[in-house]
Amino acid sequence: MGKAKAKAKQVKGKLKETVGSATDDKGMQAEGRGEQMAGKAQETAAKAAERLKKSGQ
């Protein structure tokens, strides 16, 4: 997954968390936080892969 898709997942998660907060839906809030964390992990992995690729390994 590329950095752009990872960022999109983070944004989607933030939106879910916000909607869950506004509607007092704890499940949606938790799901949103989970998506944000998954997106951050994927972004970190994509950055690491880019660095490896640039270093020629």
Image (cartoon, rainbow, N blue to C red):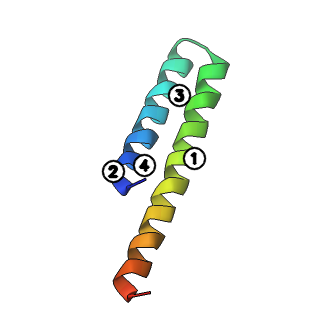
- Closer to the chain start, of discs 4 and 1, is 4
Neighbor class of circle 4 (other Cα within 10 Å; few <14, some 14-19, many 20+) is many
Residue that badge 4 annotates: 6
Task: Assess whether mark 2 and mark 4 are in contact (beta carbons under 8 angstroms).
Answer: yes
Q: State the residue at coordinates (56%, 46%).
A: 38
Residue placed most toward the observer, 31 or 56: 56
What is the three-letter code of the residue carrying label 4?
Answer: Ala
Q: Distance between the Cα atoms at labels 3 and 2?
A: 20 Å
Q: Position of residue 42 (x, y in %)?
A: 50, 55
Residue that badge 3 annotates: 17
Asked if 41 appears above or below 38 in the picture, the reply is below
Which dot, 4 or 1, sits closer to the camera?
A: 4
Asked if 14 appears above or below 45 in the picture, the reply is above
Neighbor class of circle 2 (other Cα within 10 Å; few <14, some 14-19, many 20+) is few
Which dot, 2 or 1, sits closer to the camera?
A: 2
Task: Assess whether mark 4 and mark 3 are in contact (beta carbons under 8 angstroms).
Answer: no
Asked if 40 appears above or below 44 in the picture, the reply is above
Which dot, 3 or 2, sits closer to the camera?
A: 2
Which circle marks residue 37 in the picture? 1
Residue placed most toward the observer, 29 or 50: 50
Neighbor class of circle 3 (other Cα within 10 Å; few <14, some 14-19, many 20+) is many
Classify residue 18 as left or right of residue 3: right
Task: Assess whether mark 2 and mark 3 are in contact (beta carbons under 8 angstroms).
Answer: no
Q: Residue furthest front?
A: 57
Q: State the residue at coordinates (38%, 88%).
A: 56
Residue that badge 2 annotates: 4
Q: State the residue at coordinates (44%, 63%).
A: 46
Neighbor class of circle 1 (other Cα within 10 Å; few <14, some 14-19, many 20+) is some
- Closer to the chain start, of discs 3 and 1, is 3
Which dot, 3 or 1, sits closer to the camera?
A: 1
